[in-house]
Image (spheres, rainbow, N blue to C red):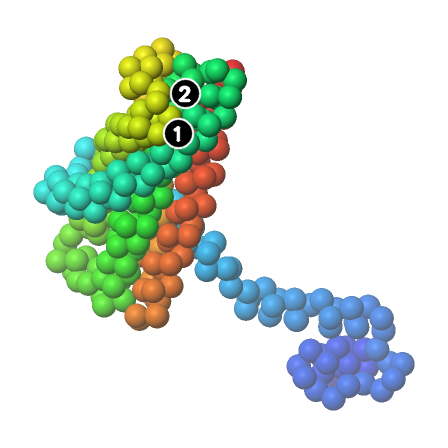
Amino acid sequence: MAPRRSSAYRVSVGDYAGGPKPAEGTQSSSSGANEATGPHLIESIRGYEPPRFLWRTLYTLLLLGLVIKRVLWHRKLNMQQTLQQISRVGPDTLGVSMLTSSFVGMVFTIQFCKEFSKVGLTRVIGGLLGLAFTRELTPVICAIVLAGRVGSAVAAELGTMQVSEQVDQLRTLGSDPVDYLVAPRVVACAVSLPILSVISFTIGMAASILLADIRYGISPNAIVDSAAKYLESFDVGVMCAKGFAFGSVISIISCGWGQTTTGGAKGVGESTTASVVISLVAIFVVDFFLSMFFFKK
């Protein structure tokens, strides 16, 4: 005959199994604590799902590592797709970047000419405009335009391919989506944005010189001489370096959010909007750290 089990054992097992509750006074405080922190805690941990933003960010970082590995280590890049993406990035961004840089430059010219003319420092206006354009304005403006024009298109395109299972079909055909879809777009944006920044800087300075001459009577030679005096090749290098960094960040975020799209057409729209917003925030964050690095002295 099997030995009878203790009442305390019967109470704890019945309690964990969902059985009837024991009479008052038979359950100890320790068993009550176990009931609160034992199975319920395990179930809550099992049912926990990390925020979608977190795993999408981790996937994007992994995607960046794969692109670096393919391009820099393995020297593996689909040149046809890359050239096609470069030809797409340039026309989509150049016109808006030039127009935006022109008006931003003229706005700064109005402020500089108005204030510095009061104290007789018109000779430094060209240098200040040149430094402002090369170090901050031009790369940031071009990056914002790139995020809105190209980044949104990339996220929408890859998101549509993801929800329509075209990415899975590429894998079935033996093509790596990173090599065929992601790496060409990242390289195209990273290479194109410094070139766009140089062109936009030239147009912005030209618009500023024209406005200063027509509106305030400051000769173009004075603006050009001042800019040549204060500008250095280092400043142009900073502009190109920021353009390269911004282009890489925008493209990898757009690709990462596009490739993690779910939920059909609604998901594509949400991924596109989120990629643009996150890219804009990333632009200013990266700009801060790059400025701290380049101008720490």
Residue displayed at 26% across by 49% down: 150
Note whether 162 is above or below 81 in the view shown: below
Residue displayed at 60% across by 68% down: 44
* Element type at mark 2: helix
Whether residue 256 is visible: no
- Residue that label 2 marks: 125
Q: Is residue 192 left or right of residue 242?
A: left
**From this viewpoint, which residue is outermost toward the right?**
25
Given residues 190 and 120, the one toward you in this image is 120
Q: Is residue 56 left or right of residue 172?
A: right
Q: Is residue 188 left or right of residue 256?
A: left
User: Circles 1 and 2: CB distance less than 8 Å?
Assistant: yes
Residue displayed at 55% across by 65% down: 48
Note whether 99 is above or below 174 in the view shown: above
**From this viewpoint, which residue is outermost toward the left?**
80
Give neighbour class at mark 1: few <14, some 14-19, many 20+ (Cα, 10 Å).
many
Classify residue 199 by image quadrant. Answer: top left
Q: How many marks?
A: 2
Residue 76, given in percent of the width and then of the height, sits at: 18, 37
Note whether 233 is above or below 292 in the view shown: above
Q: Which image quarter is the N terminus in?
A: bottom right
Amino acid type of disc 2? Ile
Give neighbour class at mark 2: few <14, some 14-19, many 20+ (Cα, 10 Å).
many
- Residue that label 1 marks: 109
Residue 193, given in percent of the width and then of the height, sits at: 27, 36
- What's the CA distance linking mark 1 and mark 2? 8 Å
Residue displayed at 45% across by 39% down: 284
Q: In the drawing, what numbered circle is on residue 179?
A: none
Whether residue 226 is visible: yes
Amino acid type of disc 1? Thr
Given residues 247 and 138, the one toward you in this image is 138
Given residues 183 and 100, the one toward you in this image is 100
